[in-house]
Amino acid sequence: MFRLTRPLLNQVLKTTTGIAGLHVHHDPLPELTRLYQSTLSELSAIPETSVYRQGVEALTERKLKIVQGANGNIAEVEKQLDEGQIEVSLNIAQDELSLVSKMIEWKAWQPLEEKPEAGQWQYFGTPSSS
């Protein structure tokens, strides 16, 4: 009798994501690992004091640990990441990598060139700290 392991069975049976325009990735975990590592590498071009870098770095490292600790179990990665199907997680990782490049281009950590108008950063009646 021919038996399939659960991860292999899941890969064999999954022919569609059920999401328009989102195709099944046949080897998603190595690709997800590569994207997370690329994001962490790109973040090194942003100063360590940047709040954006600190947040993205912490989140990406957490996600990378989940992927590396799952021993190839895609269902477990999907459950722990809580982003839906693994293909959605791949899209999110790709978008974050693209955003890191844009943040480097924009130098978003630098101070504003023009002083903001009074009350510009005041929201919903919260008194301004300046």
Image (spheres, rainbow, N blue to C red):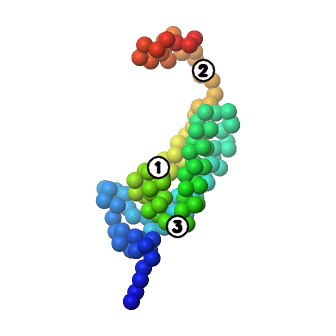
Mark 3 or 1 closer to N-term? 3
Residue 7 badge: none
Front residue of 128 and 22: 128
Mark 2 or 1 closer to N-term? 1
Residue at 50 percent of width and 51 percent of height? 93
Front tag of 3 and 1: 3
The residue that mark 1 highlights is: 92
Placement of 83 over or under 129, stated as above or below:
below
Kindly check if marks 3 and 2 are in contact, taking CB atoms under 8 A apart as contact.
no
SS at mark 1 in the image: helix
The residue that mark 3 highlights is: 72
Residue at far bottom of view: 1
Front tag of 3 and 2: 3
Crowding at label 2, few (<14), some or many (≥20) Cα neighbours within 10 Å? Answer: few
Name the quarter where the C terminus is drawn: top right
Mark 3 or 2 closer to N-term? 3
Crowding at label 3, few (<14), some or many (≥20) Cα neighbours within 10 Å? Answer: some
Residue at 52 percent of width and 46 percent of height? 96
Name the quarter where the N terminus is drawn: bottom left
Residue at 58 percent of width and 36 percent of height? 52
Q: Position of residue 79 (x, y in %)?
A: 44, 56
Front residue of 68 and 14: 68
Q: In the drawing, does residue 103 fall left or right of residue 24?
A: right
The residue that mark 2 highlights is: 113
The three-letter code of the residue at mark 1 reads: Ile
Specify whether residue 117 is in view. Answer: no
Instruction: Give the Cα distance between marks 3 and 1.
Output: 19 Å
The three-letter code of the residue at mark 3 reads: Gly
Kindly check if marks 3 and 1 are in contact, taking CB atoms under 8 A apart as contact.
no
